[in-house]
Image: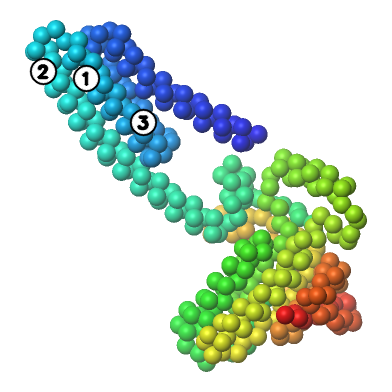
Amino acid sequence: ANGVCIDAYDIYVECQLGLIMACPFAVHVALGGVENSGGVMLWSFLCPMGAAFFRSAKESLIWFYIYMSTNAVLLAWDIWNAKVQSEVISQVYFLMNIMGCMGVVYSAVFLFARELEREYTKSEEVLLNILPSKIVKRIKRGEFPIVDHVSGVTILFADLVGFTKASAELHPNFLIGLFLRDIFHAFDELVGKHGLEKIKTIGDAYMVVGGLDHSDGEEKNRRRRSSMELMDELPSHGDSGDHHHPTSIMMLAHDMFQELRRINKKYNLDFSLRIGIHKGPVVAGVLGLKRFTYDVWGDSVNTASRMESNGLPNLIHLSSDMYQAVDGLTNDFEFTCCGKIQVKGKGEMTTYLARPLR
């Protein structure tokens, strides 16, 4: 529905710009030139000006070329129909002055509009680096605060083992400005590669979530209907529709170990990574008035964090819910049951360790 409205609006604006351009020139011709029409064609200049403010600088430039070209054609037409030489000279000077003044005014407007677009693009890029694109669209539509209940997401916590101790021994420009920078840059690229959502970094810890849905209510209903139709065509297997993001999270963890080994070798360091993953429902959204960020809350987040803190270096610690979603990945991981362990705030839990095979 939104796409149809936007298309209709674009068509409406283009039609209005065309009429603003064409009508004064048509009156100019109908009345017989500059003097007889009282310079009515000057109103056509509102077309490129309006395009600069309400469309884009690039589009306004096209309209300005059309405006100047039409002026030149009408000048030639007036000269052709002039009866005496004095009329030719006066009309030439009149249109030359008009076109010169309009050119100077439009140049200033064009440069202003182009700079405004550049600054807007920069601010959009910054905003999209902070919030998911669909969340940004919802905020722009006036939907704030945003609170979404999402079931069956996959949450990963990763922590660099020994980083706190190293921060007291190594220079911060080296440890933070080089090593940790490269680690987070590499992890960000991996998150994008696997189609997941980076939530935040907390010190040297890194949090990722898979399976979040940023759509509004109408789009959610449409996608839910499409998913149900697709599931009817597929054979029954475990988590079915949401089975892909647990797998993506596991492959992300696998790649994170590889990237850490590469960056360790680059800086001659020996850090290891501890990863914990859980699958369950969360509340996701944007709250607050200042410096707000997109975040997730709930018991599932706490469980994933406990999986990480109770895990072992270079291994992936899984809750039983997560293990049931990925126990078929035996070609990529070796799974080991830890039995029932005591987890702070959760009591006894059956957990599993996954060791990457490649």
Q: Are marks 1 and 2 in contact (CB under 8 Å)?
A: no
Say which element carries label 3.
Answer: helix
Quadrant for the C terminus in the image? bottom right
Residue 268 tag number: none
Q: Which residue is mark 1?
A: 75
Is residue 223 in view from this perspective? yes
Query: 342 or 280: which is nearer to us?
Result: 280
Q: Is residue 167 above or below residue 243?
A: below
Q: Which residue shows up at 80% across the image and 57% down it?
A: 242
**What kind of element bears circle 1?**
helix
User: Which of 215 and 193 lies nearest the eye of the viewer?
Assistant: 193
Q: Residue at x 47, y 28 (%)?
A: 13
- Name the amino acid, label 3: Trp
Q: As displayed, is residue 212 above or below residue 137?
A: below
Pick whichever, 138 or 196, lies toward us.
Answer: 196
Q: Which residue is mark 3?
A: 63
Q: Quadrant of residue 162?
A: bottom right
**As drawn, 117 above or below 298:** above
Specify which label sits upstream in the sequence, 1 or 2.
1
Q: Is residue 39 left or right of residue 146?
A: left
Q: Quadrant of the N terminus?
A: top right
Name the secondary structure under disc 2: helix
* Cα gap from disc 1 to disc 2, whole angstroms: 11 Å
Percent of width and height locating residue 344 = 80, 78
Q: Which amino acid type corresponds to the residue marked 2 in the rendered image?
A: Ile
Amino acid type at image mark 1: Leu
